Image (spheres, coloured by chain):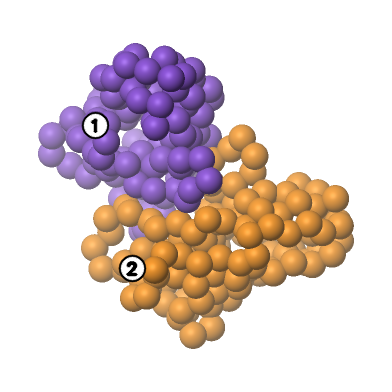
Amino acid sequence: AQSVSQHNHHVILSEAASLELGCNYSYGGTVNLFWYVQYPGQHLQLLLKYFSGDPLVKGIKGFEAEFIKSKFSFNLRKPSVQWSDTAEYFCAVNANNAGNMLTFGGGTRLMVKP
Amino acid sequence: EAGVAQSPRYKIIEKRQSVAFWCNPISGHATLYWYQQILGQGPKLLIQFQNNGVVDDSQLPKDRFSAERLKGVDSTLKIQPAKLEDSAVYLCASSLVKGFTGELFFGEGSRLTVL
């Protein structure tokens, strides 16, 4: 079975700082990868996804993520964070033999100081 | 477009009592999921339905948890009897069945506290 690790549980940044959140998964086969975000008081929503092709994917609000197959990683990045990026971020993986099932990591809580 | 509706938003019960959560997915979404999110952890899939059939319930503690989606639309998740470790947010999500996009639409969740 697949699993997902997010090593940073809490991250505090000042506005305009660069962001990188780590995500590693364990599964030897083909995977689809996702980042979901939960803003305070709101529901989980999709930020970006990778299925195939260019390993650098761009999502909403200036976020991007890079799939590095050799490292089993799918790190999330943003060059310059804003206070409104304060949220909890979840990495998720779908193994190609797992139907529509997503396995989520434990989440990283990001606080951006104004 | 209306989102995924869940109720109740909050529930406090004592251990060994029972509780039920309701979910109404986005119209036209054939796939419905129940996830359990314990504080400080990511969501964990409990059960997945496609229409009114169960696709995956391998992580559902069947001795105390049950779920149904009788008419292929809304769904109910029940816990009986509840244990302290069941304290969590129960998330319902739905998605289109044709062509997996990975985009699950989540409701706001039902927060359960078991005392």
- Residue at which label 2 appears: B1
Count residues near mark 2 (Cα–Cα under 10 Å), then give few for <14, some for 14-19, many for 20+: few
Q: Along the line of sight, which residue is nearer the eye, B38 or A13?
A: A13
Circle 1/circle 2 CB separation < 8 Å? no
Q: Position of residue B2 (x, y in %)?
A: 39, 68
User: Looking at the picture, does residue B75 appear above or below residue B94?
Assistant: below
B46 relative position to A5: left or right = right
Q: Along the line of sight, which residue is nearer the eye, A11 or A57?
A: A11
Q: Which chain's colour is purple?
A: A
Quadrant containing the N terminus of chain B in the rendered view: bottom left
Q: CA distance from mark 1 to mark 2?
A: 25 Å
Q: Position of residue A93 (x, y in %)?
A: 38, 42
Q: Amino acid at mark 1?
A: Gly
**Number of marks:** 2
| SS at mark 1 in the image | helix
Q: Residue at x 71, y 54 (%)?
A: B112
User: Looking at the picture, does residue A43 appear above or below residue A55?
Assistant: below
A78 relative position to A109: left or right = left
Q: What chain letter is assigned to the residue under label 1? A: A
Q: Along the line of sight, which residue is nearer the eye, B89 or B62?
A: B89
- Residue at which label 1 appears: A62
Residue B11 tag number? none
For the question of whether residue A75 can be seen, the reply is no
A54 relative position to B87: left or right = left
Residue extending farthest to the bottom is: B71
Count residues near mark 1 (Cα–Cα under 10 Å), then give few for <14, some for 14-19, many for 20+: few
Residue extending farthest to the left is: A53
Question: Chain B colour?
Answer: orange
